[in-house]
Image: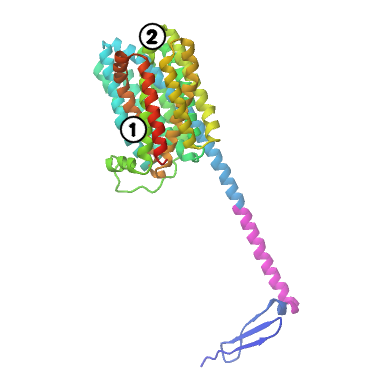
Amino acid sequence: MEVVEVTKRRTKNSQKTKLTVDDQGSGIKVVSKNKAAKNGVDYDKLKEKFDKIEHLRIAKEKEISERETQEKKMSQSNASRVTLITHVNIFLYSTCYWIQSGTLPYLTKTLGADPVMFGHLQTVFSILQLLGGPVYGRIGDMYGERSALIIAFSSSVLTYLITFLSHSLPILFISRIPSVFLHVMQGSQMVMTGMSSQEDRAAALARLGFSYGIGMVVGPTLGGQVTSHFGEHAAALLAAIGSTLSLSLVIFFIPEFKKQEADKKAQILDLKKILGLLTLPRVGSLMLIKTVCGVPIGILQSMFSVIAMEQFNLAPDQNGMLMSYIGALSMLMQGVGISAFTSRFSDTTLLKFSAMSLVLCYYLLSLLSTMTDFLLLQIPLVCSLSLINSILQSSVTKVVPASSTGTMLGLNMAVHSVIRTLSPSVGALIMSTYGYSSIGYLGVVCNIVVLAMLKFFSL
């Protein structure tokens, strides 16, 4: 029968335990460090073993630290590369869009269309953009930003390529159908939203507008030169080639970003899921503020050429210079100004400041009558509009789950599309009935309402 004998001998500095597991009395002895120290051989062996363990631990920690540092450097390098390519693609997208946009009126005229038919063509484009924005954002949320960008640039290639092949009006209208997913800016905003912190998000999104503005300057000029020498169809082909280049950059240099595990049973066209975002806390309030704030500027932009022509008697070339001046102000604000403001003040403070500034700017707009005053007023007006739009755009991505930012950006773009679609008709009605100053008064009222909402809504 097995006997287990445990004996303990307590002293001041040592302890000995003996476990007897057989009849011969052999067992396991555990001694204290001090007792082992009296036996030099045992102590040296133990010390050697502990030294080895400590050495291995230090070496392992160093290896892990070096690996984490290397991964961090690679991650930063990868982020810088993705940011650079995203801005290059926004520039190419803007250039290609304005190449074909500037030549599209001449192409429709060549195909025998009148201005009314051209208006119908633009309406089709706006409706498709309105419908495609939220669905496109949902695709990005479910399958990742890289997949979304591939779809957007594929849509642009198809749109411009079919435009190049359009030798009749029906084909030209068909060329608008792929543009339902031509949301390169939205896809790029999804990329920058995922890569930026909440504190830097407004500035990161605004800088995309800077790159877009450069393309907006280059595109019309380049498109005009190509159209003059090679025709309207050649300009569309050039836009298709530029979009193909952007598509290649995405395929070869943009990695797939990690997304939260998607619901395998979820559907892309899930209206309940898409519209359900509007019921989340603060989302509805922000979207309402964006709508109220966007109405007067949408009308002003749609009537801008009419105002320049009738109110200030500008020639077409002077109107072009005025547009370039405003574009330069917007680029400066989005490239530098937004970052300077957002790094020093909270979003709520900047929204209130912008709304108050816009109240004053729109009031002065209703009073001025000279071109010089109009040019000076554009400085605070453009800066305030750029600031409030950037803050609202970044804010809506902060109040929804990270897995739904793409869909939220799509809804944000849909609001913009609705305003852009309705503004020309509403603006024409207001100006013909109440005159040019009515746009300024509308802006005053809308931004006072915005200030009231900022006061009573918890943002």
Q: Which mark is first along the chain, 1 or 2?
A: 1
Q: Which mark is residue 113?
A: none
Q: Which residue in the structure is indicated by mark 2?
A: 309
Which residues lie in the magenta part?
A: 37-64
Q: What is the secondary structure assignment of the residue under circle 1? A: helix
Residue drawn at x 53%, y 36% as measured from the top left:
345
Q: Position of residue 38 (x, y in %)?
A: 75, 79
Indicate which label's residue lies in the foreground, 2 or 1. Answer: 2
Q: How many marks?
A: 2
Q: What is the secondary structure assignment of the residue under circle 2? A: helix
Residue drawn at x 63%, y 84% as measured from the top left:
17
**What is the quadrant of residue 133 in the picture?**
top left
Label 2: how many Cα within 10 Å (few below 14, some 14–19, many 20+): some
Q: Which residue in the structure is indicated by mark 1?
A: 133
Side of 180 where 13 appears, left or right: right
Q: Position of residue 349 (x, y in %)?
A: 49, 35
Q: Nearer the viewer, residue 365 or 64?
A: 365
Looking at the rendered structure, the kind of residue marked 2 is Met
Side of 352 where 74 appears, left or right: right
| Residue 63 is inside the magenta segment | yes
Q: Position of residue 21 (x, y in %)?
A: 56, 87
